[in-house]
Image (cartoon, coloured by chain):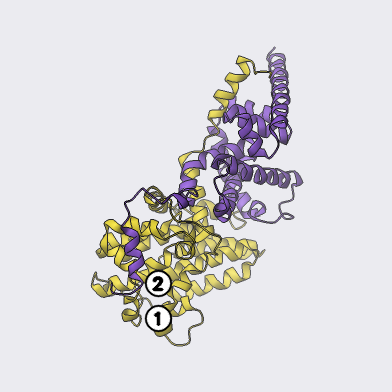
Amino acid sequence: MSELSPEDRALIDVGGRDDAPSGAARDRVRRRLAVRLGAGAGLGIATAATKTAAATTAATSLTMKIVLGAVVIGLVGAGGAALGIAVRGNATTATSTSTPTSTPTSTSTSTSTSPTSTTATTEPTSPATAAFEAPRPAPANAPPTPASAGVTTPIAVATVPATAAHAAGRPRATAADTAAAPPAATALAAPAPRDDVAAAPPTPADALAEETRLLREANAATRAGDPSRALTLLEEHARRFPRGVLGEERDAERVLALCAAGRTTEARGAAQRFLAARPGSALAGRVRSSCGGS
Amino acid sequence: MGSPRAAPASAEIAPPRGEPAPAPAAVPSFARVYEDHFDFVWCSARRLGVPDATLDDAVQEVFVIVHRRLSEFEGRSSIKTWLFGIVRNVSREARRTIRRKSPHDAKGALADPELLTAAAEEQPDRIAERSAENRVLHELLERLDDDKREVFVLAELEQFSVPEIAEAVGCNVNTAYSRLRLAREAFAEAAARYRAREKGSAR
């Protein structure tokens, strides 16, 4: 067979090296995959969050805030270093025993929380909303008491890959990961305590999960070519979480949704307000490059 | 604790870590595949001609498919040849989409105008990262048609054996040998022309 000349060989060897991805590219795609595939990707957020939450019962809700917040930052398309770390942690600890399936993952949050929602509030519109309908409690409501540890449990379970539970394989990756942290194993293995605390007001972690859900659905709607639904969801977020942790992401997403809806003038106004209020935002570049930034 | 559902989970904890049972070990976890093969998927997509502006989307698409179909991977082939088959399809589709130059026609994430904008936004950095040799290499690869380009990339840049190449691109071994020979000739010719042109313009 004809061989390449040494000159061509060298060109291939030297030139080929630069095709390698940067660490930033790897993390960027990982973030977007985590958003797109949801927790079921096992790329996840899920196990890492569970582990962290259990290992540090005191700081559980804060951890969830960081991890979930990062999901949404990734969702809008920038930043999110925290997720990169969380995800990397999981990737190195996850063993290869679970078998991802094509189970849709976008519903994992709502389905997993449904047991609590049945007793939680009146007139649940959807399982997920029901659980979070109550106003956000003050942070003082979330001391590291046994009760609040219990409250966080559904969240931890909710973010565990749906595939782990449904897969033909066994949910052992998660169980084994958390073996070193008995609280986590307990939380995952015994969802029963959730019933005891179902009537308790949602913790900040609950609220954040709901904020995340709204933004995620809004983002998906924009991508699916339904910006008016996205805008409705974003309005809902603004109404229910006027001081929400993810207000910045909401405002950025709104600019993009307005652009997608062809409402350029409004997009410009929203973009200007965003950039004036948050000039240093990680999302500023994204907003600036949208139709509202020109 | 005390819930009946606790029992299976704690039983699962019992076996020593890092020693999965033989059957599930054949199918690696999605996270593992991502960690181990992200670079391969990325490089392959790039070398098969996916433009920088849509590379993120294409690689993402590959892993979405991997996620969906991983359970079908039965270890008949090596994971890399299996992955390359997916990269190959996604890359061809991405190139077709670009050729059509009509992002609104096509379906799926690759054609999402917003994503294209986002990717384009980051593009200058990425181009700056690339050396002159890399740009020349890609220009030469562009001269090969898809069939030749695929076997060439696998053989010369990934050091796949010819039987592995045959499996990855789904042809028989003789065809793979023949394509590789033609691909090397075409590459060498394109390289020679390139050098001649460079010398010409330097004078």
Residue A38 sits above or below residue B168 on the image: below
As drawn, which residue projects farthest toward the bottom? A122
SS for dot 2: helix
Q: CA distance from mark 2 to mark 1?
A: 9 Å
> In this image, A64 relative to A277: left or right?
left
Question: Which label number is shown at residue A134?
Answer: 1
Task: Judge by depth and name the residue closer to the eye, B136 or B161.
Answer: B161
| Image quarter of residue A140 | bottom left
Residue at the front extreme of this rendering: B22
What x and y, as percent, mark residue B108? 66, 56
Q: Residues within 10 Å of mark 1 (few under 14, many from 20)?
A: some
| Residue A169 sits above or below residue A234 on the image | above
Left or right: A172, with B146 as reference point: left
Task: Identify the element where label 1 is drawn.
Answer: loop
Residue that numbered label 2 is attached to: A207
- Residue found 64% across the figure and 26% down from its top: B136
Query: Which chain is yellow in the picture?
Result: A
Q: Percent x, y for residue B111?
A: 67, 52
Residue depicted at 49% across the width and 65% down the height: A250
Foreground residue among A151 and B118: A151
Q: Nearer the viewer, residue B109 or A154?
A: A154
Determine the colour of chain B.
purple
Q: Residue at 66% of width from left, 32% of height from top?
A: B151
For residue A193, which numbered disc appears in the image? Answer: none
Front residue of B192/B179: it is B179
